[in-house]
Amino acid sequence: MSPELISILVLALVFALATTLSVNMGGLGFAAAFLVGTTVGGLTAEKVLGGFPGDIFVVLVGVTYLFGIARANGTVDRLVDLAVRVVGGRIAVIPWVMFGVTGLLTAIGAVSPAAVAIVAPIALNLANRYGINQLLMGALVVHGAQAGGFSPISVYGAIVNGVVERNHLPQNEIALFLASLVANAVIAVIVFVVFGGLKLGRADKPAEEATPREPITFHQVLTLLGLTTLVVLTLVFDLNVGLVAITIAVVLGVASPKTNAQAVNQITWPTVLLICGVLTYVSVLQQMGAVTYVGNAVRDVGSPTLAVLLLLLIGAIVSALASSVGVLGATIPLAVPLLSVGHIDPVSMVAALAVAATVVDVSPFSTNGAIVLANARDVDRDAFFKQLLRYGAIIVAAAPVALWAVLAVVG
């Protein structure tokens, strides 16, 4: 049995053990990364640890730390009340406002995880306050980010269009953008209906009848300034959202040590362990060539149309467990030999590959899904993780097939 196949089977074993036993999947991931990487893959411990997702670790800790402070001093409550007032107490509108805001942020150039990191904590607090299914809210935030994610001036759009140009393929920037926008909007509508969005009514008290709040405090003003600074520095100056969030949280913590102590306890360490452990093992898979191994096998398939479907599925599966940007850069070049046959429209194929690799970012192992998981409020976190995992698995299985049928086959 080849080392690549062994590493893939061990990944399946990690999932099986974590879902049947009360063992943190992240712990299993770290152990598997060490054992498989050093004994089967011939990697050193340093190379195994080199795959630790430090960027995601910082984002999860920084965002939950900062919004832990904002919750402790009442700032989040004020933002939640403001959001409800803006929509006139119509609770069913709130998820769509969150969808639209994240979509707008990514469409004008924000990195998808940065947009989700800014919107998700407030959105999930709204969901918790007004009885909105938190999976519904989290999914609409992530799909909103991906809906705007391929505009011609967006990060994802620039990456894909650059890869297409380097591989001398025909490109259509507007078609790429619309493909992602429509696909994510359709999924969002289905999620909204399935998870009870149509049953949402109005807030118990209209805005004009709401109980007056206490005057805003100095620490709330300082926190609002901090959150505004987070938005400006990450979206305008493209600074790392995790590092900026931690820095602002530390400043706010120094200003209010009592609040800081409460906020540190709200950092979701089990979620951090889970995500970082699994992604470290996925890095071992990549270093051992497991992804390339599967990609090469696809090229040996006789039917170009079937090979396209397999590529879409591989892109979705790998992206659900790793970096969407990395998958975008890898799957499109893999498709070039298939596109050269002439039976498949290149623009449709590229759009299908791009959407398949990003629509699955609701997975709890992607940065966006992990942010949603980390910011869920007053839920059984293990149960919510499994909900996200099941939902992500459905998207991974269904979205590539639908894209294959609509974009790759029909064109």
Image (spheres, rainbow, N blue to C red):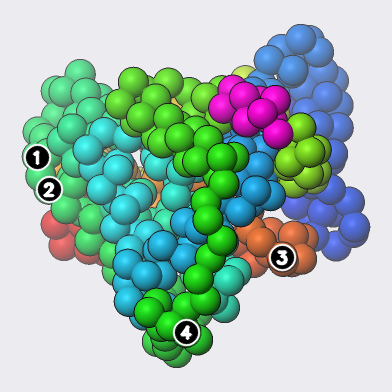
Q: CA distance from mark 3 to mark 4?
A: 22 Å
**Identity of the amino acid at label 3?**
Asp
Residue at 45% in and 35% down:
225
Residue 378 bears which disc, if any? 3
Question: Measured along the vertical axis of the image, is residue 351 above or below residue 277?
Answer: below
Tell which circle, 1 or 3, labels the residue nearer the N-terminal end: 1
Q: Which residue is disc 1 drawn over? A: 172
**Identity of the amino acid at label 4?**
Lys
Q: Position of residue 406 (x, y in %)?
A: 22, 63
Q: Secondary structure at mark 4?
A: loop
- Neighbour class for label 2 at 10 Å: few (<14), some, many (≥20)? some
Residue 226 bears which disc, if any? none
Q: Which residue is disc 2 drawn over? A: 175
Residue found at the far front of this picture: 215
Tell which circle, 2 or 3, labels the residue nearer the N-terminal end: 2
Q: Which residue is disc 4 drawn over? A: 205
Q: CA distance from mark 2 to mark 3?
A: 41 Å
Asked if residue 250 lies in the magenta stretch, the reply is yes
**Label 4 with label 2: CB-CB less than 8 Å:** no
Q: Is residue 178 visible?
A: yes
Tell which circle, 4 or 2, labels the residue nearer the N-terminal end: 2
- Main SS category, magenta section: helix
Q: Secondary structure at mark 1?
A: loop
Residue at 74% in and 17% down:
49
Residue found at the far right of this picture: 22
Closer to viewer: mark 4 or mark 2: 4
Asked if residue 365 lies in the magenta stretch, the reply is no
**Label 2 with label 1: CB-CB less than 8 Å:** yes
- Neighbour class for label 3 at 10 Å: few (<14), some, many (≥20)? few
Residue at 49% in and 62% down:
80
In the depicted view, which residue is nearer to us: 223 or 239? 223
